[in-house]
Amino acid sequence: MTRRAGVFVCHCGTNIAATVDVKRVAAELARDAGVVFSNDYVYMCSDPGQQSVIDAIREHNLDSVVISCCSPNLHEKTFREASSQGGLNPFQCEIANIREQCAWVHKDRDEATTKAVKITRSAVERARRNQPLTPIGLPVTRKVMVIGGGIAGIQSALDLANAGLDVVLVEKQPTIGGHMIQLSETFPTLDCSQCILSPKMVEVSKHPKITLMTSSEVTSVSGFVGNFKIKVHTKAQYVDPDKCKLCDDCTAVCPVVVPNEYDVGLNDRRAIFIPFAQAIPASYYLDPESCLGLNPVVCGKCANVCEADAIDYDAKPKDSEIDVGAIVVATGFDLYAKDKMAEYGGGKYPDVLDGIQFERMCSASGPTGGQVLRPSDHEEPKTVVFVQCSGSRDPAQHCVYCSKICCMYTAKHATLYKHHVPNGRAYVFYIDIRSGGKGYEEFVQRAMERDGVIYLRGRVSKIYQSKGKLKVLGVDTLAGKNVEIDADMVVLAQAMVPSKGTTEVAKALKIGRDKDGFLAEAHPKLRPVESVTGGIFLTGAAQAPKDIPETVCQASAAASKVIALLSKPELEHSPVVARVRESHCTGCEMCVDVCPFEAITLVEGKAHVNEVLCEGCGTCVGTCVRAAIDVKNVTQLQVFEMLEACMGGE
Amino acid sequence: MSFGKLKKAYGRITINPNWCKGCGFCVEYCPTDALEMSNAYNAKGYHPPRVKNADECRDCKFCEKVCPEFAIFVTTDQR
């Protein structure tokens, strides 16, 4: 038990000091028995603030330290390091949270100050009985799994592999490339999406450090940072990518024709097909859903003509278990289904397209060879209406949030349309133009001024078909009148939603999602690429709607976080773990059942804690009827003394 | 709707009802569900199959192979 505590009260600028009288907190604590030093400072986390802690430990020979400041999530590590520089064991430093748990939630200065004193006092009581601890060392698997093969996953995988780490890239679809490979040209420079992505895809396939697993999904994950065990299910590969010579003989004989997913229904494919010419792995793919029967007796035409003997109808799915040290989740987005936009005739009228369909149409490799044509009659549309915020920013019916990229891609679509059909008319309905980004505002201005796209500020209320035209009813709020446009084609800038795979992977990895279903980051500002679970990192549109440059930045950021994590020979695990008092343990196994981390087992009739797996959550402590289990530095005695300190005096 | 130029394969199904013994293999095993059993009786008193959806036939000829009575065959339809 320590007897020479030091208390340091932070103003946090005015964050704390505006509501809490920090001087009074410091003065009251100074009078407490066992507190030999008490001080306040405007920014305790700044260099002079930390130095004052170090100096006080040395000068006053402190044996425990309490910092009264913000949440321990933010600066516990900072102050424990400072205490350690002063010569204390880092675990003899405790944080009293008087910002989030006091200053920010109260108004009455007097009462808030009294509460701050109590919170600090209780932390002093806890620190008094803290034992010096040393972190537990863990071995690390120097291998990373990247889930999702879009631009985010590709970029992360390449950065990681180039840093010398082994990477397993898992993709659900038969090819990598994601949504970016479907795009025609990219804003604001109008460079061709395929031309900038295909070389990266080839690099992935040729990189000696990257193992590519397509048509594969993560089914479950166990373990912890540095040592994950991941189960991956790979669908049956009826065409062997190593043998396939891309001769295209199989598609000539396949009798089946179904809509092509890659062209979002604007084009067809066979049951055996290559999603697009630059697909990686460069191989045809047999879709068992549309094939007549995966049986040489039923049809078997493709296998008959395949000279390379690459087709095997008896191929079986595979399950593999892979050990990795860290995981990068890059599962991407889907467009909000256009059939949900009943008011705009989405899914009902063939000439109402979504953004990706229009991208395919503008693409040189697309279903029309780059011409803009109406799907209904294959004629060139003379009037096209682009509707922004279709499904976004609509809390009443659709998504609450702004999908961020639609302003820019609509400007791009309208520009591309005017390039293809110079005498056509392009209208854009918008609520606001959000064009923050390098060269973005100039791009939108160019669409308006140079390409003559007509921007109307207002929402579209209804779209219906009448006499071969799509009647678009909207409002121009700047002119203050209703607008009615006879359009040949309508393009809906659909909202971005987390992909189906994102939902599934979040469940398998047990990582959190936000209210809109996107993956939740550990801290919105300071830890934007980390999940709350150690060793799992987030990138791309699975975390929030974002454009390509931002996705690439985040992908590289996630990769650098992984590289930093796996660069150490050993990881440190918090020593704040459960400890069993064997003399009291009866081996009832109740703690074994409740432990959420499966860290407790019964060894020779007594509970035994695997310190590597234990997260110190204390569930076992609450369950044990004989008080035989305690978490180090949060013992029941400490908890009672903390409660007494909180309640004391009233 | 689609801009695709791929052509499906079509088959023309011919059924000889009087050879049929109504086993239903062709209906059961047709991968595109182009056939169904009829209520009609043939000379032997069995229900022969009939074409339900001619456009669905992909000319795979699997019905020919499973028919124990050689009562059904498919010719390629060059439409």
Image (spheres, coloured by chain):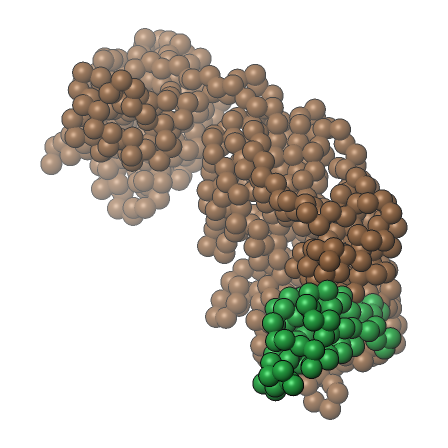
Query: Is residue A469 depicted above or below A497 in this figure?
Result: below
Query: Is residue A415 depicted above or below A302 in this figure?
Result: below
- Residue A280 horizontal side relative to residue B34, left or right: right
Direction front: furthest residue = B44
**Picture colour for chain B:** green
- Residue A617 horizontal side relative to residue A392, left or right: left
Q: Position of residue A378 (x, y in %)?
A: 83, 77
Image quadrant occupied by the N terminus of chain A: top left
Q: Is residue A235 visible?
A: yes
Which sits in the foreground, A260 or A7?
A260
Instruction: Chain letter for brown, please.
Output: A
Q: Residue at x 26, y 46 (%)?
A: A108
Picture quarter containing residue A168?
A: top right
How many numbered marks are there?
0
Q: Residue at x 16, y 26 (%)?
A: A626
Q: Position of residue A90 (x, y in %)?
A: 39, 17
Query: Is residue A320 depicted above or below B14 in this figure?
Result: above
Q: Is residue A480 visible?
A: no
Image quadrant occupied by the C terminus of chain A: top left
Direction left: furthest residue = A650
Q: Residue at x 60, y 72 (%)?
A: B23
Which sits in the foreground, A260 or A131?
A260
Which sits in the foreground, A619 or A424?
A619
Picture quarter containing residue A621?
A: top left
Picture quarter containing residue A347?
A: bottom right
Q: Position of residue A296 (x, y in %)?
A: 74, 55
Q: Residue at x 72, y 61 (%)?
A: A298
- Residue A501 horizontal side relative to residue A551, left or right: left
Q: Position of residue A39 (x, y in %)?
A: 33, 23
